Image: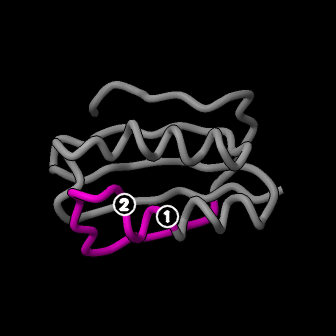
Amino acid sequence: MATRHLSITGRVQGVGFRFYFERTARQHGVRGWVRNRRDGSVEAVVEGDEAAVSAVIEWAQRGPRNATVDAVTVSEVDGGYADFEVRPTE
């Protein structure tokens, strides 16, 4: 089981990033959450088997069609999520 925290920068708000991120996470059976940050970035935690988590991270490096991803910073964190959710902006 892998759990990763992602900080995604670029043009990632106002382009449906959270919606598509949630859809991608659910398609891969990944748990965790995603939310916008007040600084214009998107933050997420993904948890699941290594291959599924890697697939979601790979998708995040591209994002949806109208996004421009400048960087994705990934770090290991503790897990324990039951589902995937979109959280309010923080």
Q: Is residue 34 magenta?
A: no
Q: Which residue is mark 1?
A: 59
Pick the residue in front: 52 or 87: 52
Measured Cα–Cα span from mark 1 to mark 2: 6 Å
Q: Which residues are magenta?
A: 59-76
Residue pictured at 71% horizontal, 33% vertical = 81
Answer above or below: position of 3 versus 61: above
Answer above or below: position of 50 versus 70: above
Residue 78, position in %: x, y?
69, 49
Query: Which quadrant would the C terminus be assigned to in this image?
Result: top left
What is the quadrant of residue 14 in the picture?
Answer: top left
Q: Is residue 72 magenta?
A: yes
Disc 1 packing (10 Å; few <14; some 14–19; many ≥20): some
Label 2: element kind: loop
Q: Which residue is mark 2?
A: 63
What is the quadrant of residue 79 in the picture?
Answer: top right
Label 1: element kind: helix
Pick the residue in front: 59 or 37: 59
- Amino acid residing under circle 1: Trp
- Amino acid residing under circle 2: Gly
Residue pictured at 58% horizontal, 59% vertical = 56
Residue pictured at 38% horizontal, 60% vertical = 7
Q: Are marks 1 and 2 in contact (CB under 8 Å)?
A: yes
